[in-house]
Amino acid sequence: MQLDKLTPRSRYFEDFEVGAVYRHWRGKTVKESDAVTICNMVMNTAQGHFNDEFMKNFPIGESVVFGGVTLSMIIGLAAQDTAQNAIREIGMDNVALKSPTRHGDTLYAYSEVLSKLDTGEQGGGEVRFRHYGVNQAGRLVFRGDRTVLLKKRPQER
């Protein structure tokens, strides 16, 4: 896969090309406090996210990060490059959590531009991205498609 250079700070609808793949420059280590706090905030009571003793009974052997946290972190890592000029989020689909994320894993994000549609809606156009999240070992932990309504570049007067 050929990677394009990192996206500049202010990407508009016109700046994204179908087929481009971007590596986002930041990474995020998932601290146990991040994962457990968010899990509790959204009232996810599944023991597999915060009870290491319980998880010793399963092949994974330890708590795993709630998939909603993994998804949110990957979208957050990609947002600086893909959503600084967002008018609104349209939707997400084809979401897949491919491998467990553990406390202490460091996540990195990549984004591929799947399509663009010049809707003219609210002065913008739709861009559909496929976001990928990998951990420090390069293992794919997340994949999902996201559609965003992005502003068009302001016209010079």
Image: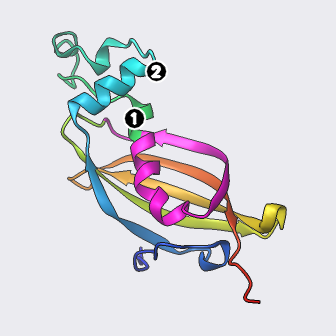
| Residue 69's disc number | 1
* Residue stretch rendered in magenta on the structure: 71-100
Which badge, 1 or 2, comes first in the chain's sequence? 2
| Residue 16's disc number | none
Q: Nearer the viewer, residue 9 or 2?
A: 9
From mark 1 to mark 2, how far is it between C-alphas?
Answer: 10 Å
Q: How is the image coloured?
A: rainbow
| Residue 42's disc number | 2
On screen, 66 above or below 111?
Answer: above
Quadrant placement of the C terminus: bottom right
Identify which residue is drawn at 44% across, 41% down: 71
Q: Nearer the viewer, residue 155 or 93?
A: 155
Horizontal side of 10 relative to 86 (left or right) equals: left
Quadrant placement of the N terminus: bottom left
Dots 1, 2 in contact, CB < 8 A: no
The picture quadrant where one finds residue 147 is bottom right
Q: Position of residue 19 (x, y in %)?
A: 57, 74
Residue type at mark 2?
Answer: Val
Horizontal side of 33 relative to 114 (left or right) equals: left
The picture quadrant where one finds residue 129 is bottom right
Residue type at mark 1?
Answer: Val
Please tell me how crowded label 1 is: few (under 14), some (14-19), or many (20+) other residues with Cα within 10 Å. some
Given the current orientation, which residue lies at the most extreme right position? 120
Magenta stretch contains residue 94: yes
User: Closer to the camera: disc 1 or disc 2?
Assistant: 2
Horizontal side of 145 relative to 155 (left or right) equals: left
